[in-house]
Amino acid sequence: MLEATSRETLNNTLFDFYTTDDKFIKDAESIAFKLKDKVYPDRVSGVFNGQIDLDLLQDYEIYYLAKVLFINFQGGKPIDPARFFTPIEIEKYEGMSDIDYTREKSNKLIFDNCIQVTNNMWTCGKVSIQQIAKFHNDSLIVYDKQIQRETEKRQTRSGIKERIKIYRNSVRQIRDLMLKGDYFPTAITYNILANGFEKYDYNVEKKQLIIEVDENNEFAILDGMHRSISGIEALRINEKLEQYMQVNIFHLDIQSAQRYILQESKKNEISKDLLSYFDTDKVASKLINDIDNEGSRETNFIKGNMGQDQEAVRLQNKFVAYSTLIKAIEDNFKLDKKDIRKTRQVKEYLKSFFNELISIYKNEFEDVKNSRKNSFITYNNSFYGYVAMAAKLYEVPKWQDLLFESVAKIDFSRKSKTWKTLGMASINITNKQINSVYKIFKDFIKIEEEVAVDGK
């Protein structure tokens, strides 16, 4: 490429202004059709739906994507391929043969010399970086944000968007060590998603694991994205590079995969907000995880509106952070891990409670960014109070009416003296302040004691 940073600059430009832009996302099918002779359509759709990062595209694929957007979709000068690729590279890519669709493209990953460690884990001691790159190039490996560490929040033309968080210096250092033959490999970890649609077969005698992927069966990278990208970049420089990696493969559901990430975090620090979400051994964590994955946004209003960290709440206008809800539920509901029945009842109740609350403040929650300018209604820390109210109203007859009457009494104005010392707009709020928020919100609820017929 023209400069050492050309590929990185082009990737960032495409992400910030094109592949995350609603206009181009709507045209993704047309873009894929225009590219079909040179780039497989599933590669293009993977980029636009966020399952394939631009870093994982081959140079010729990124060239053709930029070219088509530039020429056929009025992409503009920022992605003119001539700004990034050398004349020799352009001539090489333009001379490439069209894709031969008569040759069947495999949807299977085959791992040889694979040892079964447990009934849901295998380890392969020696997998070439070429094979790993081929699996990525064939779109057999996906990136699932639900089982990854923190994402990078980028300001794009369509607002704040999430992307794989890549530390470029780390990638360059690993890549250069691989090219020198000095890289000491550590295991890359993948996961066959346990969702009832998985298709895999392990042959004990051959020590061979075969995994078949389709639209229902996901094979995702759990840990090792930096190593994978480093290897793919190294192959762009030396396609005959001799580099082998150890590979671990799990067969886990989403929650178990998150627990794996939690375990790995003991070695590498992850934000506390995200750790609390991944720690599904905690009753409250699993409860919140379940709420966020059940139903649709039409029936479960808080679904998709919980942020994995405070940054997501602030920049993406999510309603509340996972860690806030988890702490509030732990403090106010005192759930017992062994009392599955009550936990289920509380979960269903909280879904109804949040639906009721969000309905009361429908306009505010539909425009969170604007609401937060003058009011604390949609602030993260208000959810400490909302959960406290939910706990007080739990199993109370006609709680919906009491909730409406109670929140109507609250002056949520940012100018109100009620919130003066509570740090409602703060990212970090003390336990003392949280306890004060619990009390203030609960005090607005007045539950009249039922009087027996005989007056006693």
Image (cartoon, helix red, strand yellow):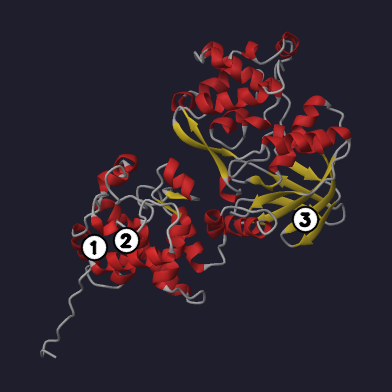
Image quadrant where residue 90 sits: top right
Q: At 72% from the left edge and 17% from the top edge, which residue is drawn?
A: 1
Look at label 1 and name its amino acid. Leu
Look at label 3 and name its amino acid. Trp
Judged from the image, the secondary structure of the residue bearing numbered disc 2 is helix
Rate crowding at label 2 as few (under 14), some (14 to 19) or many (20 or more) other CA atoms within 10 Å.
many
Is 288 displayed left or right of 93 in the figure? left
Q: Which mark is residue 353?
A: 2
Image quadrant where residue 253 sits: bottom right
Q: Which residue is mark 3?
A: 122
Work out whether 161 lies above or below 217. Answer: above
Instruction: Tell whether label 2 touches label 1 (CB within 8 Å).
Output: yes
Q: Which mark is residue 403?
A: 1
Alpha-carbon span between mark 1 and mark 2: 9 Å
Between residues 179 and 43, which one lies in front from this camera angle? 179
Is 378 displayed left or right of 291 in the figure? left
